[in-house]
Amino acid sequence: MDLSFGPEYEAFRAEVRGFLDRHKDEYPGPARPTRADALAWQRRLIDNGYAARTIPKAYGGYGAEPDILKSRIIAEEFTRARAPTGMAGQGISMLVPTLLEVGTEAQKQQWIAPTLRGEIIWCQGYSEPGSGSDLASLQTRATEDGGDFVINGQKIWTSTAMQADMIFCLVRTEPEAPKHAGISYLIFSMKTPGIEIRPLKTMTGHAEFNEVFFTDVRVPQGQIVGKRGEGWQVANATLKHERGMLGDPNQAESRLAAITDLMREETVGGERLIDNPVWRDRLMKMQARVLAMKFNGLRLISAQLNGESPGLAGLIVKLQGCDINHELAALAIDALGELGVLYGDSPHLRAGGSWQQRYMFDLGLIIGGGTAQIQKNIISERGLGMPREPKLAGA
């Protein structure tokens, strides 16, 4: 049985390796790289087809045809070289694919290219203090006034709101409509008068999340994505891409490679951790889970290219990805031994303290983007056809 990719793909692999070898001095640092370095690397990746690969050139992408094997080769070679795969986040990973699906031509032309290049930072206005798991119960309202919507309400757990230039936001435009109707999906500047941002510091020591308050915020009605009152469908398109971002197998594979390096370097009693059968067994168990995640990702890509529903394979992505990423960080913390409890500015930190930060931040992601408990309900009800969770009397 010949499992090689064939001459065309091996030539492409050599091309990717050559690129990485030529530009290895340009890699942004692993722990909070400077914005200038990240932007420069992102431009380099797009120009060479290693980021935004299949997004049309007309919208700032590279414009390549979808090819599962080439995508796999790029991921493998970037992991091998320990090279960063470019910028991600709410704008690039969530809004851009949403606009490609349901945005107008004018919206695609205006927003996709600068977002891909990292020139615009976006945040997501979804959760509210009383509308987290039951997002459709959101109460932030937008009322008509001339050619504008006037927005009043509050959002919470808004990642990067302090840094964001723009927001994509769910608001209720028809308060008398049923819960899942009457919601609209707006995009507007975070510098619009009437927006107040209050940081929420987490146990990482950083304020990745924020509260956002809207008081008589005026947004032109033309800044709606999709149709008025049908924002729930648009929101679900974005949520699908959010789950894909949080369950990215390439990210997990890169982390596994970094942990393998760590266990080759760290020693206990003069013995490398990688040579200790107990530690090696833990690493191999995580390797098996990451491989399963990777092959499920290939299944999803195949379904997308064939115009098929991924079914259950798509429903497990977020739960699987967040659990694995947190357990990978936990393995790294354990492998560091007493150094794993360090945080802040200790001179003994490894990798700039990135493993400690990931461990604590990834714990939050098991809740964010749809809690693990909600994800399990979705998998059981929609994927496995099990009875719906019973509601409490009067709920």
Image (tube, helix red, strand yellow):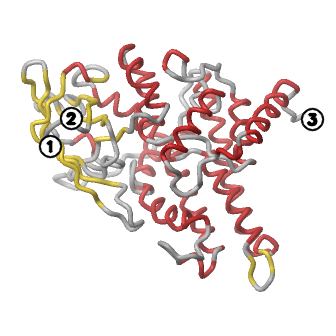
Q: Amino acid at mark 1?
A: Gly
Question: Upstream in the sequence, badge 3 or badge 2?
Answer: 3
Q: Residue at x 28, y 50 (%)?
A: 132
Q: Residue at x 45, y 22 (%)?
A: 100
Element type at mark 1: strand
Q: Position of residue 185 (x, y in %)?
A: 27, 29
Q: Are marks 3 and 2 in contact (CB under 8 Å)?
A: no
Q: Which residue is mark 3?
A: 1
Q: Which residue is mark 2?
A: 171
Q: Are marks 1 and 2 in contact (CB under 8 Å)?
A: yes
Q: Which residue is mark 1?
A: 153
Q: Amino acid at mark 3?
A: Met
Q: Amino acid at mark 2?
A: Val
Q: Is residue 10 left or right of residue 178?
A: right
Question: Upstream in the sequence, badge 1 or badge 2?
Answer: 1
Question: Upstream in the sequence, badge 3 or badge 1?
Answer: 3
Q: Position of residue 317 (x, y in %)?
A: 53, 45
Q: Position of residue 315 (x, y in %)?
A: 50, 42
Q: Please name whichever residue, 12 or 72, is drawn nearer the observer in this view of the structure.
A: 12
Q: Is residue 296 left or right of residue 356?
A: right
Which label sits in the foreground, 3 or 2?
2
Q: Please name whichever residue, 223 or 241, is drawn nearer the observer in this view of the structure.
A: 223
